[in-house]
Amino acid sequence: MKLAIADILKREGFIKDYTLVEGKPFSSIAITLKYMSDRRPAITGLRRVSKPGLRIYTKRDEIPQVRGGLGLSILSTPKGILAGHEAWREHVGGEVLCYVW
């Protein structure tokens, strides 16, 4: 799931790159952050929506837009982890994982 989220963030231009770092007890993900020309970070905010104690689900027609379309919602759908606009295009809803702007 974490690799799928990192892949979405890279495709949408929020991060430069990510690599999987193999370790002995466990693996980790190294993410290279992206900055604008005036040294501002590309990710200015991140909000977790669903939690283990309270899952938030949405239908295809009710997929939230983040910051008027400037941000990104990430959903867990039957077709995998998708960005909000990809889930809308695929005609699926699902669990809202987080918002990124």
Image: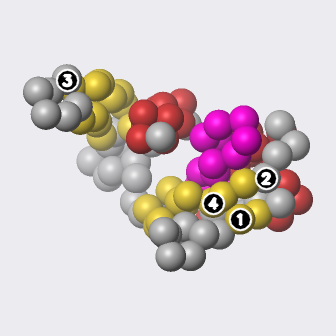
Assign a secondary structure to mark 1: strand
Q: Give the numbered dot on residue 22.
A: 3
Mark 4 and mark 2: Cα distance apart in space: 9 Å
Residue at 21%, 26% (x, y): give it.
21
Mostly what secondary structure, the magenta segment?
Answer: strand
Q: Is residue 26 left or right of residue 33?
A: left
C-beta proximity under 8 Å, tags 1 and 2: yes
Residue at 28%, 25% (x, y): give it.
20
Assign a secondary structure to mark 2: loop
Q: Is residue 63 left or right of residue 99?
A: right
In this figure, which residue is indicated by the disc labeled 4?
Answer: 96
Mark 4 and mark 3: Cα distance apart in space: 29 Å
Circle 3 packing at 10 Å, graded few (<14), some (14-19), many (20+), is: few
Q: Name which of mark 3 and mark 2 comes first in the sequence.
A: 3
Residue type pointed to by label 3 = Glu
Q: Is residue 97 left or right of residue 60?
A: left
Q: Name which of mark 1 and mark 2 comes first in the sequence.
A: 1
Residue type pointed to by label 4 = Val
Is residue 93 something that shows in the picture?
Answer: yes
In this figure, which residue is indicated by the disc labeled 2?
Answer: 93
C-beta proximity under 8 Å, tags 1 and 3: no
In this figure, which residue is indicated by the disc labeled 1?
Answer: 57
Q: Quadrant of residue 64?
A: bottom right
